[in-house]
Each structure stands twice: as C-alpha cells, then as structure tokens.
Image (cartoon, rainbow, N blue to C red):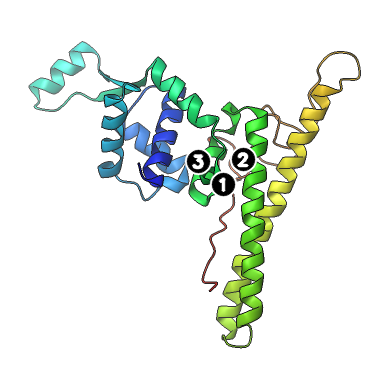
Amino acid sequence: MSRRSGILEFAVLGLLREAPMHGYELRKRLNTSLGIFRAFSYGTLYPCLKMLVANGWLIEETGSAPEEALSASLAGRRAKIVYRLTPDGKERFEELLAHTGPDSWEDEHFAARFAFFGQTEREVRMRVLEGRRSRLEERLEKMRASLARTRERVDGYTLELQRHGMESVEREVRWLNELIESERAGRDQRRSPSDGSAQQDDRTGPSGGLPRDRGDASPGGTSSGPATPPDTSDGPVN
C-alpha cells in the first residue's frame, strides 16, 4: 500500500467512526474538514472504499428509505450507498491511531493524524508531536545551510522565497512547542492533583493538549471540524 493510500484509509475510517456516510458526504468531509485531501478524486476514493469493504472494515447499506429507493429505481437512478464502520473496522482504526512511526511525522500524514488527536491517547499525541518537531528541526537546519550556501548566487526574489519557507518551518516549530508544553502541563496536573483527585489543567482544552487562550478552537483557526497544521512545505530551497 502506498503512503498516500494509507493516509486516505486512515482518514476514511476515522470519519466513518463518527457517523455512517455515503460517498459524496465522505468526499466533502475529506475536502472541507481535512484540506490535505483537496486533490483526491472519486477515482481515488471509491477504490479505497471497495478495499475497506473487501477487508471487512466497512459495510455497504442502502441509505434511502424504501419508498425513496423504489422511486430511484423507477427513475433509473441508483440508490445511495451508505458506508458504515464494522467492529473490525473500528479495531483497525484504533491500531492505526496508536501508530507513531516516522511516517506519522511527514507533512500529509501528520496533518491527518492531528485532525484526529481528539480520539488519540495523550502519550501517543506526545510521541507524534515530538517526532514532528524533531523532523522539522532537521529540515530547518538543512534550509539554513542551503540558504548560507546560495545567498550570493541567487537573486533577491529567490532569496526572499527561501526565507519565507524557512520562516514557515520556524512558525510550526513554535506552534509544536506550545502544544507539547500544554500536553505536558495536562499530564503533570493529572499525576499531581492538589486535593487528591484528578484535575484538568486550565490551559488545556477537552483533548488535554489545546490551550484555551489561543482565541480559536483549532490550530487551523476555524471554530468547527478537524484542522490542519500550518503549511511548512520546503519551497524552492536547494
């Protein structure tokens, strides 16, 4: 399985864990709530759905009421197929959710993982966040070295573009530092309650890792739906 198809499998299982959906609804959620999938088409989604059904992780159901299904049949239209997560599918998603390997730190996979942090155990969140930060710090060092080597050989516009890319990575590293500190604060608060019972840290949200004073409900700046982290593509750095 390719890396991109693995990300799509994870996202589909995660969204269907929330509620059954038909293909159009699912694609809309992938496009709007998880912006990293804007380039995915029906030609990519439906083979993934068929594979998940064949593996026993999803089942297909007719989503319309009987009279609507009959009307669709008389009109020559296909009744909508709704996809529902099976118990095996839920177990598969839990398995993927607990994974913290290097691929979960890469740009697209990390964004998908972060969108489901509300369903992820705190220790797993910490490992993914720290792994992502480490990966970006390595990238930042390479970008700085490249900038130092090419500074005298490129025009001003290319130089500014390289600086912009580096600033984007630095911004995400600062964002990750804030999240990691919030996760640690919440964990320490649970381990050392002052009155003998577990208390939630004032700086953490329902998931235990989002500071409440950030001014919005998600790192993406939207008030609802999963968010994607800041864009830190490498840009044109050579």
- The picture quadrant where one finds residue 71 is top left
Q: Nearer the viewer, residue 209 or 53?
A: 53
| CB within 8 Å, label 2 to label 1 | yes
- The picture quadrant where one finds residue 168 is bottom right
Placement of 133 over or under 223, stated as above or below: below
Q: Nearer the viewer, mark 3 or mark 1?
A: 1
Point out the tag, 3 or 1, that comes first from the N-terminus.
1
The quadrant of the image that shows the N terminus is: top left
The residue located at (57%, 37%) in the rendering is: 100
Quick one: label 3, few (<14), some, or many (20+) residues within 10 Å?
many
Residue type pointed to by label 1: Trp
Which disc is residue 112 wearing?
3
Where does the image place residue 88, in percent across and percent down from the top left? 40, 18
SS category of the residue bearing label 2: helix
Which disc is residue 128 wearing?
2
Point out the tag, 2 or 1, that comes first from the N-terminus.
1
Residue type pointed to by label 2: Val
Q: Tell me: 205 left or right of 87.
A: right
SS category of the residue bearing label 1: helix
Q: Which residue is mark 1?
A: 105
Placement of 122 over or under 110, stated as above or below: above
SS category of the residue bearing label 3: helix
